[in-house]
Image: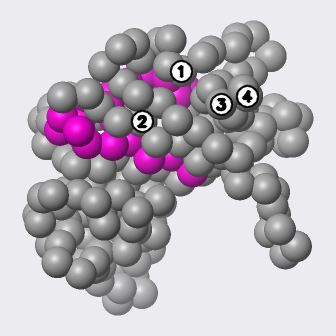
Amino acid sequence: MITKYLSTASRTDIAIIDVGAGAITQVGYTHPGKKISITPVDPLADHYANVLRKRGVKLPFPTVKGDGETLLSQFSRASFDIAYARNSLDHTYDPIATIANMLELVRDDGVVLLRHYRDEAEGGEYEGLHQWNFDCKDDRFVIWNKDTHVLVDKVLGPNAKVSCSVHLARKGEWRDEILVMITKAA
């Protein structure tokens, strides 16, 4: 997903925020002709930093503490080219607010890229962290749980072009994934 966007991006300096990155971002930081900087963010960053420090691990882009619902109090609007999240927003209190914040953080023509397991809360019977389901129905990105059903494009409005697809699990893969690209209008 990110590589495809980078291949067409006109900017050479690319800033990426990885929301819910965990201890170590999974986002690669090299691409031909691009200088990439990554800001990994996770609510458990302090804990991860202690674990990594005890093991002598130094990262090119250490994870900083933060959560999706309060990103705008921590980072400047329009300061990233890509806002990315992989299988993390279903752990948030409010994934819609988090996505809206991610969209505010990207520059005009920037993108929010999401890659999440399909309907994880249903699969986990709403136990633990997984309280939200992500799906792509009739080419529309849907976030839902037992109490609510949200068409994300309706919430984000005309300043966001939302596209989604389903990556069906192949042999050896755990489950289907939902791939979402939200482009911020200029």
Q: Is residue 173 placed above or below 44 in the rendered structure? A: below
Residue 152: mark: 1
Residue 89: percent from the left, percent from the top? 54, 39
Foreground: disc 3 or disc 1: 3
Q: CA gap, disc 4 to disc 1?
A: 11 Å
Chain-order first, disc 4 or disc 2:
4
- What colour scheme was applied to this rendering of the protein? one colour
Residue 182: mark: 2
Residue 130: percent from the left, percent from the top? 71, 38
The residue sitting at the bottom extreme is: 56
Q: Which residues are magenta?
A: 93-115
Q: CA gap, disc 3 to disc 2?
A: 13 Å
Secondary structure category for the residue under label 1: helix
Tags 4 and 2 touching, CB below 8 Å: no
Q: Residue at x 64, y 44 (%)?
A: 165
Foreground: disc 3 or disc 2: 3
